[in-house]
Amino acid sequence: MRPAPFVEDTRTILFSKENHRQMVEKEEEEEEEEEEEEEEEEEGTRRAERPHGRIANGRVASEATDSHSLGEFM
């Protein structure tokens, strides 16, 4: 004996909702992983671009050598 048509429709709807929920969760996890990878890449880029020389007052050496200070030495 087959169940009534509305019972089959209900099962299909529930299955579809569960399937959709799983797909959405998977997509969200993938997006989070991509964002984390991008943040790690950005942090690595920032570290690579950061100059290593510092001046006593804490400013980066490149910040201290602006046009005014260069003019003083010339």
Image (spheres, rainbow, N blue to C red):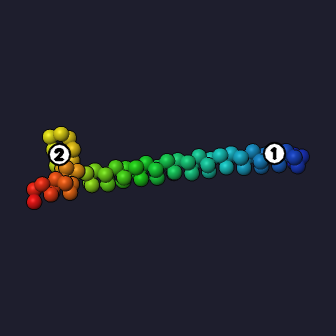
* Residue at mark 1: 10
Tell me which amino acid carries mark 1: Thr
Question: At which x and y percent is residue 29?
Answer: 52, 47
- Most extreme residue toward the left is 73
Front-most of 36 and 1? Answer: 36
| Residue pictured at 49% horizontal, 47% vertical | 32
Please determine whether, in this image, residue 54 is positioned above or below residue 68. Answer: above
Horizontal arrangement in the rendering, residue 74 relative to residue 9 (left or right): left
- Most extreme residue toward the top is 57
Mark toward the viewer: 2 or 1: 2
Q: Earlier in the sequence, mark 2 or mark 1?
A: 1
Residue 66's image quarter? Answer: bottom left
* Residue at mark 2: 54
Residue 73's image quarter? Answer: bottom left
Mark 2 burial class by Cα count in 10 Å: few <14, some 14-19, many 20+: few
Question: At which x and y percent is residue 18?
Answer: 68, 45
Front-most of 10 and 67? Answer: 67
